[in-house]
Image (cartoon, rainbow, N blue to C red):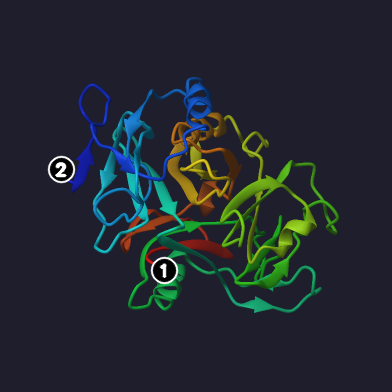
Amino acid sequence: MNNDGMRVLDSDGRASILVRIFAGLAWLPGVLAGCGAADDGVVEGEAAGAGGESDVASEALVPVPAGYSEVALSAPSSGVRVFKRNDADEWVTIVDLRQATARNITGAVSGGDPDYLLVQRNSYTAYWTDARSHETSTRKLRVVVSGTFGAFTYPTGIAFGLKKDGSHISYGYAAPGGPAPESFNVKLFTFNNPMSRAWIGAYDRSSFGSPDVVGALDVAADKNKYASIQRTMVGVRDDNGDGDLETILVLSTRRATQAVAASRLSAFGAHEMAMLDGSGSTSLIVDGATRIAADRPVPHAIAFYSGK
């Protein structure tokens, strides 16, 4: 541990720790090859759900980039891990849905077209308070990250789609088929699915059958892409090669271009990635401590809990 309560990777850029996940590494060579294009070296290390609290059986190695330290979380922390980049205000949250819980958190949903309901914008700290109210004896809040795109009105429409706990909110006013479609390559991030627990793919209304849907953009979409600004990107990963994308990865950074942010998330082994709202909307709270503060109220956040 260093003085910030973080576990630091070896000085030569290699972690000496193993992660416990099921066997099935057919995906790993492709991941490692894909990470070679990133601006960070990839080394062997731990993945989500590793350590003494894990109940999975066999050991295997998955990539953890050099230059990141693990943030010490309050116990219990099974299924949720956070890594901080040593030379920047940048964090990667890793959530193993076999042991952890993800929830969409929104402002109050109000009227409008039933396909495009409006949502009240709240402060990022209000979402932490809301998320805490959903704790149970076995499920404890660890991380809240900023989420999907909205507008600057009160209440606001949702740009690219949102569904929460099985309740439809919006197909996205700027998504394909919406009343004001934009030319971006729109993606959907879904989780808590009965088959693949997490998924990222092209926008399609059939994907709103998932209980939780978050509209997003392709990581190459031009949202001031060359500027080094605050960004939030999400990825999914299949740690045991069984076809179930059980692991969610979220990169939250104070300063990065889109390409750099995407390469850093890819280095953690993300199979698919998408871009959430960034710039002044980016926020990150870890164990109640603000790591990145949003400059404005937003309509949505995603909460991650240890335990089920």
Q: Which corner quadrant holds the N terminus?
A: top left
Disc 1 secondary structure class? loop
Quarter of the figure with residue 76: bottom left
Q: Out of 217 and 35, give the one closest to the viewer.
A: 35
Mark 2 and mark 1: Cα distance apart in space = 28 Å
Q: Out of 69 and 257, give the one closest to the viewer.
A: 69
The vertical placement of 242 against 131, above or below, is above
- Residue type beneath disc 2: Met
Q: In the rendered picture of this protein, how many numbered marks are placed on residues?
A: 2
Task: Tell whether 117 sits left or right of 126.
Answer: right
**Residue 37 coordinates in the image, percent (x, y):** 51, 20
Looking at the rendered structure, which numbered label has been put on residue 38?
none
The vertical placement of 102 against 57, above or below, is below
- Residue type beneath disc 1: Lys
| Residue topped by disc 1 | 308
**Residue 23 coordinates in the image, percent (x, y):** 42, 40
Residue at 63% across / 55% down in the picture?
149
**Residue 239 coordinates in the image, percent (x, y):** 46, 43
Q: Do the residues labelled 2 and 1 touch (CB within 8 Å)?
A: no
**Residue 252 coordinates in the image, percent (x, y):** 45, 46
Looking at the rendered structure, which numbered label has been put on residue 1?
2
Q: Which corner quadrant holds the C terminus?
A: bottom left
Residue at 47% across / 38% down in the picture?
24
Residue at 38% across / 58% down in the picture?
285
Q: Are there few (<14), some (14-19), or many (20+) residues within 10 Å of tag 1?
A: some
Task: Tell whether 169 sits left or right of 22.
Answer: right
